[in-house]
Image: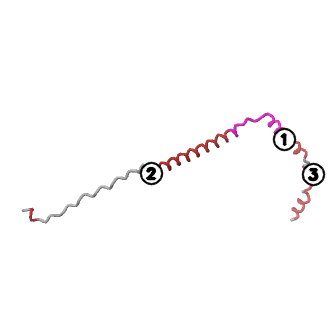
Amino acid sequence: MDQSNLPQTPTPAPPAAAPIQTPDPGDTNNSKMVLWFILGLLVIILTVAGIYWYLSKQTAKPQTPQSSNQEAAVSENLDQELNSIDVQAVDNDFKEVDADLENL
């Protein structure tokens, strides 16, 4: 068979390659954005570290002997007040209420 009589189909041309876009050396928006991001992150880290340091110093204060003496004095005063309450007098105040409740 003779192939010269067959109709020829055109072969498609290969697609043109997309041009590669190189960043413009005058365009520094991306580099400025990265710089601001790094600075912001650094500020946040330093703030958190400062708060942690401050709070750790607040809780590490040793207790002075004077404050323990004051606490002992307050505790003794509270014990004296508690022992000075007359429970019998309070119990007598509720006798009327108890009698009324029994009648119900």
Locate residue 90 relative to residue 13 in the image: left or right: right
Q: Residue at x 9, y 63 (%)?
A: 4
Q: Which residue is mark 1?
A: 74
Q: Which residue is mark 3?
A: 89
Give the residues in magenta.
57-71
The prevailing secondary structure element of the residues shown in magenta is: helix
Q: Which one is in front in this view, the residue at disc 3 or the one at disc 2?
A: 2
Q: Earlier in the sequence, mark 1 or mark 2?
A: 2
Determine whether 104 is above or below 47 in the image: below
The image position of residue 46, as x and y in percent, is 60, 43
Reply yes or no: does residue 92 show up in magenta: no
The image position of residue 40, as x and y in percent, is 56, 47
Q: Earlier in the sequence, mark 1 or mark 3?
A: 1
Q: Nearer the viewer, residue 81 or 33?
A: 33
Mark 1 crowd level (few <14, some 14–19, many ≥20, 10 Å Cα):
few
Quarter placement of the C terminus: bottom right
Which amino acid does the dot numbered 1 rest on?
A: Val
Which amino acid does the dot numbered 2 rest on?
A: Asp
Determine whether 45 is above or below 100 in the image: above
Which amino acid does the dot numbered 3 rest on?
A: Ala
Q: Nearer the viewer, residue 70 or 88?
A: 70
Q: Earlier in the sequence, mark 3 or mark 2?
A: 2
Q: Which residue is mark 2?
A: 27
Q: CA distance from mark 1 to mark 2?
A: 72 Å
Mark 3 crowd level (few <14, some 14–19, many ≥20, 10 Å Cα):
few
Quarter placement of the N terminus: bottom left
The image position of residue 10, as x and y in percent, is 18, 63
Q: Which one is in front in this view, the residue at disc 1 or the one at disc 3?
A: 1
